[in-house]
Image (cartoon, helix red, strand yellow):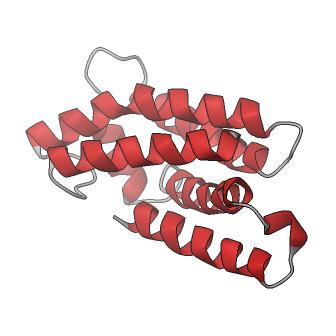
Amino acid sequence: MAPLVVLVLTTAVARASGWLGLDWLDSWPQAVQVGLAAMFALTASAHFVQPRRRLLIAMVPPGLPNPSALVTLTGVLEITGAIGLLIPATTELAAVGLALLLVALFPANVRAAQLDVGIKTMPLPLRAAVQFAFIGAVAVAAA
């Protein structure tokens, strides 16, 4: 739930800053880019700090190689995408990459919900709805 709260609040503050005269935030796509960057910076941090890192490793579906390395890789991809959203020349590429990452990581969330392992945030139907909202926000950011 914290990532959603960070996304919504940071986007709102960024958009309000645009209304107050910060020209580069004077559009919804740019405000959403800032909100997503904050959200992905938050989620990326969990990939590197205990106890969340251990919980993320537990969520990796069996059969995938080296869960620890995969958690590190996805954390690096999240922070890279967050930075990429804030650079106009890379915003679209970062948004596409983050959308693909959200889709790729969803099976780990399904596994966590079904087996009650890893980071427990919300029931699966709500988690799926939030995941679609994140993907929608990434689409807005790419506009």
- Where's residue 141, x and y in %? 66, 46
Q: Is residue 135 left or right of residue 23?
A: left
Mark yes or no: residue 60 visible: no
How many discs appear?
0
Q: Is residue 52 left or right of residue 135?
A: left
Residue depicted at x 22% and y 55%: 120
Q: Quadrant of the N terminus?
A: bottom left
- Which quadrant of the view contains residue 108? top left
- In this rendered view, identify the residue nearer to me: 33 or 122: 33
- Which quadrant of the view contains residue 104? top left
- Where's residue 83, x and y in %? 76, 49
Q: Residue furthest bottom?
A: 20
Residue depicted at x 43% and y 59%: 50
- Vertical placement of 76 versus 34: above or below? above
Mark yes or no: residue 44 visible: yes
Q: Quadrant of the C terminus?
A: top right
- Where's residue 32, x and y in %? 63, 58
Q: Is residue 119 left or right of residue 13?
A: left
- Vertical placement of 42 versus 130: above or below? below
- Where's residue 52, x and y in %? 38, 57
- Vertical placement of 20 versus 134: above or below? below
Residue depicted at x 53% and y 48%: 137
Residue depicted at x 63% and y 29%: 96
